[in-house]
Image: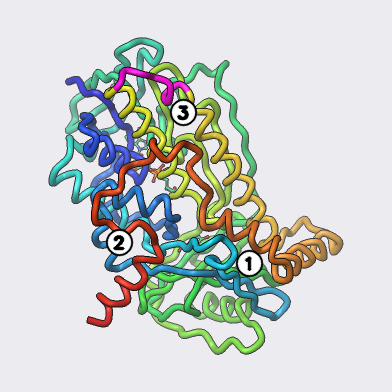
Amino acid sequence: MHTTVGIIGGGPAGLLLARLLHRAGIDSVVLESRDRAYVEQRQRAGILEQTTVDALRAAGAGERMDREGLVHHGVELRFDGRSHRLDFPALTGGRSVMVYAQTEVVKDLIALQLREGGPLLFGAEVAGVDGADTDRPVIRYTHEGREQTLTCDYVVGCDGFHGVAKRAIPEAERRTFERTYPYSWLGVLADAPPVGDELVYAHSDRGFALASVRSPTVSRLYLQVPNGTDVADWPDERIWDELGLRLASEGSGPLHRGPITAKSVLPMRSHVTEPMRWGRVLLAGDAAHIVPPTGAKGLNLAAADVIVLAAALTERYTTGSTTLLDTYSDTCLRRVWRAEHFSWFMTTTLHTDPGHTPFERRLQISQLERIATSTHAAAELAENYVGLPVGMSAACRPRVTAGCRTDVSGTAAAAANSMSS
Ligand code: APR
Ligand code: PHB
């Protein structure tokens, strides 16, 4: 079998790329090792930057997101028993974020691709890529018990942190940068109304806590826990008690408790693989970089990579020029490192590090106070949180279909209208 672009991995990066290529008239095949139900149910973050929202709309996958997504105009920071709101539009010249879970993004993209896209094969496990430095790279994979090959013009590795695509870059040419953290997150889903109208990021002596939202009746909550924590040690009552203590601030009411429907422990890691292109193999999303989730950047970075890549491949097949493909790795890595820094900053500022001295703990509080009292410091955080530009000219960004709303704020009114009607 031959295709123009062979995509390894059917997570958000692979699926969004397939959709953007389909819209540009470029064939692709997506090979995903897991089954559909597994991919659709994997719990991940849920904050979408404007650029990601625009790309999903441009991919034709914006309809349910625009109906059900919640536009958030700020976040709350809690520390030292006090609460401080960061007003995103005021700090960033009008920008906001959309809360719409990655599980839902993935469901929307899969349904669309199966309905009107190129092949998307589940249970297709890729063993490796041969001929990265030739004109016809080949993906080796197993599907329905048979070993098969897919010959491609280009191969894109969207196969996540443990994927095989990055091995196509010779070891001597591949550089990795990594940091692990001395804590993990215990993440839970609860049938309970959200803690506040916006996300709450809380720093306390007992550790970090984050209160996020999935819908008006479902909360997504996280607690900093030691590495190696067993969820069995965290019965529901203990989770609610600890959330109550860490999220408490002057004037905050009691938590709305409810049944906890899912619990898991998530490790925290920063990782970058360079370069993101070798010959005709390109890496995108978690295959090339991981961030700790504190800055809500993972999904948005994956989306930014494939936006750049779809534009580069479109240029290649409309004009024959490989200029954007040739600069793909450099273009993406600039944004990746900014997000790596921001995610590291949010993580190390908000968590309680068991190795910290009282001196370092005072520095954390001083930094948080600076954010709470200086418009400049708050704006620096807010700009990074709502997302920086994709680092390419506007002409290269995906076209937004006529009639689509082009800003998340525009959607707020529409969402509010559709909810009240
Ligand atoms: N063959 C085929 N598919 C594979 C293989 C393989 N050898 N190895 C991994 N995969 C699939 C995985 O099953 C997974 O569905 O690749 C997909 C990678 O998806 P993600 O891990 O979700 O990565 P990505 O699409 O880059 O999305 C990034 O996910 O981890 C979060 O925070 C991150 O939100 C961000 C997003
Ligand atoms: C989430 O909603 O799951 C979420 C939100 C913000 C983060 C991390 C996770 O920083």
Tell whether position 321 is magenta.
yes
Residue type at mark 3? Tyr
Q: Main secondary structure of the magenta part?
A: helix
What is the secondary structure assignment of the residue under circle 1?
Answer: loop
Q: Which residue is mark 1?
A: 208
Bounds of the magenta segment:
319-326
Q: Nearer the viewer, mark 1 or mark 3?
A: 3
The numbered mark, 3 or 2, whose residue comes first in the sequence reads 2
What is the secondary structure assignment of the residue under circle 2?
Answer: helix
Q: Residue at x 59, y 86 (%)?
A: 252
Mark pair 3, 2: CA separation = 28 Å
Q: Position of residue 84 (x, y in %)?
A: 64, 75
Tell me if mark 2 has few (under 14), some (14-19) or many (20+) residues whose alpha carbon lies within 10 angstroms of its own.
Answer: many
Q: Which residue is mark 2?
A: 65
Q: Which residue is mark 3?
A: 328
Q: Position of residue 186 (x, y in %)?
A: 52, 63
| Residue extending furthest toward the right | 359
Residue type at mark 2? Met
Tell whether position 185 is magenta.
no
Residues at circles 1 and 2 in contact by the CB criterion of under 8 Å: no
